Image (cartoon, coloured by chain):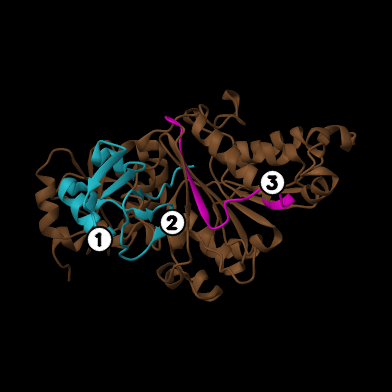
Amino acid sequence: MDNLHERYERQIALPQLGEAGQKKLFSAKVLVVGAGGLGCPALQYLAGAGVGMLGIMDDDIISLNNLHRQLLYSSEEIGLSKATIASKKIEALNPATTIHTYNTRLTNAQALKLFPLYDLVLDCTDNFATRYLINDACALLKKTLVFGAINRFEGQVAVFNHNQEENIRPSNYRDLFPVPPSDNEVMNCAEAGVLGVLPGVVGTMMATETIKLITGIGEPLINKILLLNLLNYQQSIINIPHSTQGAANLPPDEQAFLHKDYVAACNPPSVFNIGRERLFELLEDPQTLLVDVRELHETPVVAQLPLIQIPLSVLHQNFDLFEKETIILFCQSGKRSLQAAALLTEKFGSKKKIFSLQNGVTDITGPVY
Amino acid sequence: MKTTVHFYGQLTDITQTPVLELEGIADTDSMIKDLLEKFPGLSQAKFSIAVDNSLVQNNTRLKDNTIIALMPPFSGG
């Protein structure tokens, strides 16, 4: 056990923080969802500051193209679990911090189970489906949410659902954007690009907001969003009043929340569905690939059109086979191909045009009796 | 009467400028109509509108020298 005073003496020396603030940090419990660009610096500074308990959640593995901005990880750790490696690094940084590691993608049920165990939740994720899931769970559970998001050279930081004063209804992300855009409508980092230091700056600001909220110092961005541009250092702080449209789109209770499909809400199936006529139009383009996602034994066998077979069950291991620009997926009924379309959209974003045959194989063969 | 509009994120891909000054705009609805005429691509974009650093949900009357922010959602992390 190291000398507690020595480790934290430079921040205890701050009159605004002092011993009292340090004690608040020791007893604080913070869940960081996403251990990527935003999560890495946020975790480092929160552990450094002496936050008593940290939850680290991520289902992803470390990739080479993460390393320009996710500086908790090193080259020899490529292929390993982000949550596991982040936990090891954070433990080495501050052994006094209790760490809970979650190698999973957040589900609705898990949010209801885990969030009450923490004082604050940090949204360090990279997709709208999980961002709205986190927001709605925090609104439902009245849990303070520190939000951060990035795009190219610009960042957004906000504090939602923080019940500071009884007479002010706290705002949440739905007061800003009542319904999710589809992931197709807004480019992610993979498509839009991101300057490596940007998540470093924004993730560090999220840790700053968290420390301010825990210790009660300064003016956290409660019901406000900070917009930051690294190219010219222009900043704006926008007030977010409580909106009726935002409130109307929140799930009213836990049951409604548990039944909400956030992935589908961000990837409306209708955008993928096409019928027989559109199929044959698209097939005239040599850059179109027709893919049968049924299991190999399923009938009727389609012999009349050039296609490849990649069953849904092994689709995630075969992303390299989807070389063409336009992908048309089909299965027996149009349901599994929709799942495949959602998976491929998650993988390729708007780089490819992805379609699903609405009525399955019958759109090719005609009705089979 | 002057209105200064700041575009954030990938809205600047459509507008090709981060800031634009408009003259004689009475309210946010007519501002949006004016912007859609100048930049039809904005009709496909999602964004929220802030008037003098406060988010607005409904049509809002504009005073002289108002600062507008058009802010898209970011998902990156």
What residue did someone put label 2 on?
B54
Give chain A's shade. brown
Does the magenta segment cover residue A2? Answer: no
Residue type, numbered disc 2: Ser
Residue A97 % position (x, y): 78, 43
Q: Nearer the viewer, residue A344 or A233?
A: A233
Residue A135 % position (x, y): 52, 60
The answer to the question of whether label 1 and label 3 lie on touching residues, with beta carbons closer than 8 A, is no
Separation of disc 1 and disc 3 at Cα?
A: 40 Å
The answer to whether residue A296 is visible is no
Q: Is residue B45 left or right of residue A32?
A: left
What residue did someone put label 1 on?
B29
- The residue sitting at 21% across, 52% down in the picture is B24
Q: Nearer the viewer, residue A249 or A167?
A: A167
- Quadrant for residue B7, please give it: top left
What residue did someone put label 3 on?
A211
Position of the C terminus of chain A, as image quadrant, is bottom left
Position of the N terminus of chain A, as image quadrant, is top right
Residue A258 % position (x, y): 52, 70
Give chain B's shade. cyan
Q: Residues within 10 Å of mark 3 (few under 14, many from 20)?
A: many
Q: Nearer the viewer, mark 2 or mark 3?
A: 2
- Sequence order check: which comes first, mark 2 or mark 1? 1
Point out the residue furthest to the top here: A75
Mark 2 chain: B
Residue type, numbered disc 3: Ile
**Bounds of the magenta segment:** A213-232
- The residue sitting at 61% across, 36% down in the picture is A41
Residue A213 % position (x, y): 68, 52
Residue type, numbered disc 1: Asp
Where disc 1 sits, the SS reads: helix
Tell me if residue A209 comes above or below residue A45 in the rendering: below
